Image: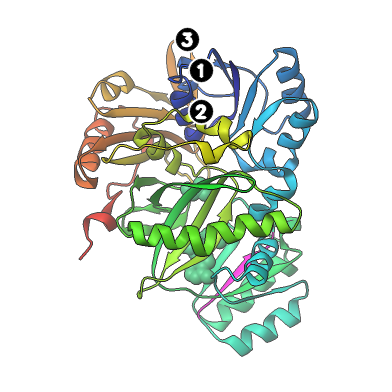
Amino acid sequence: MKVLVVGSGGREHALCWAIARSPKCGQLYCAPGNAGIARVAACVDIPADGLGPLVDFAKREAIDFVVVGPEAPLVAGLVDRLERAGIKAFGPSAAAARIEGSKALMKDLCAKYDIPTADFEAFDECDAAKEYIRARGAPIVIKADGLAAGKGVILCRNLNEAFAAIDHIMTERSFGGAGDNVVVEEFLHGEEVSFFALVDGTTAVPLVSAQDHKAAFDGDEGPNTGGMGAYSPAPVMTSELQERVMRDIIQPTVNGMVAEGMPYKGVLFAGLMIDPEGHPKLLEYNARFGDPECQVMMMRLKSDILEMLLACAEGRLSDIRVEWHDEAALVVVMAAKGYPGPYAKGTEIGGLEAAGELAGVTVFHAGTTADDGRVLADGGRVLGVTAMGGGVAEAQALAYAAVDRIDWPEGFCRRDIGWRALHRP
Ligand code: AMP
Ligand code: GLY
């Protein structure tokens, strides 16, 4: 069959890499793709948010199945438009994708369907929000409602920080329209874990857990990023805990979305906090695979990803079995110096072949472009050096051995990806 993947990040490279191995995959396209994706798929020069051109391309090329990677085209309604044009697609409708796009919607769903989450209140008015904050006290968490490129969450240690956060979001409108409403939320303590499930409207199939490292620098210091590395599985996620998350969080969400008239189809990415007593609470939902979590998931997946995504889109998830390698996988993100602030583009990256030759290593590309046989950096997060090993320690050693073969003086990476798993009591 003819498959089109939409996106250009490390997540989409990992998806293309896995889909290309499926016996079902005839021709594989990616829009817009990157230099690494170009080795496994035909890249099409249409941006991921070019909804009209993407639908036209899919019709013209008689694409059988479209897999949408990032959230923006989902929230904008790409899957709805493809389906209206008679093209099968993986990912939620615009209405269902609001589970990521609108924090207030997600929190209301939790309240209505008894899904464990932090206590919260939503406000569209500054003074009322501040009054509530004063009553609840600090620490407290302030979130801009709507998509704010992962920066709309402010963890406040004291009341002054909380009031400043409200002003920043609502008065100064630092996140634009995403700040019309804020969610004020209880500060949760514990260990964070990402958990993924495929959902076909009614049936949810658990995938695996992962942990990512959001801070830019070693020791979880510095500004938040899209993710500087990840590993899977997350040791905190035992099979008992996974069952509990499926029963108390994922399935009630799936049922609630049906009851609300916006059945969820696609991958449901739950950001969870596991409290010191081992109780899980939902921090957030994303309507897509994580990046870089997807890279480690695709490395660990034994089953045919294309079969899985198709079964999801066709409402047949109850028929499938998903198998994983027991090994751990770990990804180290290499980013352009300066990221997540301003950074240079166009610097040359060497050593990619040597790194990829190590057994058990795959170098996924994110912001790269090809130029006359050379690979140039073309974004903030640039490479996802991914390795599989017997455990997290082995995967980590292998991933850093591969990093050390990469010759890119203008790039940097964290040197401690996986520390949480390696320092468990
Ligand atoms: P979110 O985008 O909602 O996942 O928030 C981004 C990050 O902020 C999360 O990954 C957590 O590290 C942190 N965070 C969000 N909500 C809370 C909360 N209620 N308590 C403590 N930390 C939180
Ligand atoms: N790595 C976190 C995310 O994809 O949202």
The reply to whether dot 2 and dot 1 touch (C-beta < 8 Å) is yes
User: Where is residue 214 drawn, in percent x and y?
Assistant: 43, 53
| Residue 334 appears in view | no
- Category of crowding for the residue at label 2, using alpha-carbon neighbours closer than 10 angstroms: few (below 14), some (14–19), many (at least 20): some
Q: Residue at x 45, y 30 (%)?
A: 14
* 405 relative position to 339: left or right: left
Q: Amino acid at mark 2?
A: Glu
Q: Residue at x 42, y 58 (%)?
A: 243
Pick whichever, 379 or 121, lies toward us: 121
- The stretch of residues the image draws in magenta is 139-145
Q: Amino acid at mark 3?
A: Asp
Q: In terms of sequence position, does the residue under pointer 3 or pointer 2 come before the other?
A: 2
Q: Pointer 2: what residue?
A: 307
Residue mark closest to the camera, 1 vs 3: 1
Q: Pointer 1: what residue?
A: 24
* 289 relative position to 355: left or right: right
User: Where is residue 245 drawn, in percent x and y?
Assistant: 46, 61
* 234 relative position to 163: left or right: left
Q: Residue at x 69, y 38 (%)?
A: 73
- Category of crowding for the residue at label 1, using alpha-carbon neighbours closer than 10 angstroms: few (below 14), some (14–19), many (at least 20): some
Q: In terms of sequence position, does the residue under pointer 2 or pointer 1 come before the other?
A: 1
Quadrant position of residue 191: bottom left
Quarter of the picture holding the C terminus: bottom left
Against 199, residue 39 (above or below) is above
Give SS at disc 2: helix
Q: Pointer 3: what residue?
A: 372
- CA gap between label 3 and label 2 equals 36 Å
Q: Is mark 1 within 8 Å of ligand 2?
A: no
Label placed on residue 108: none
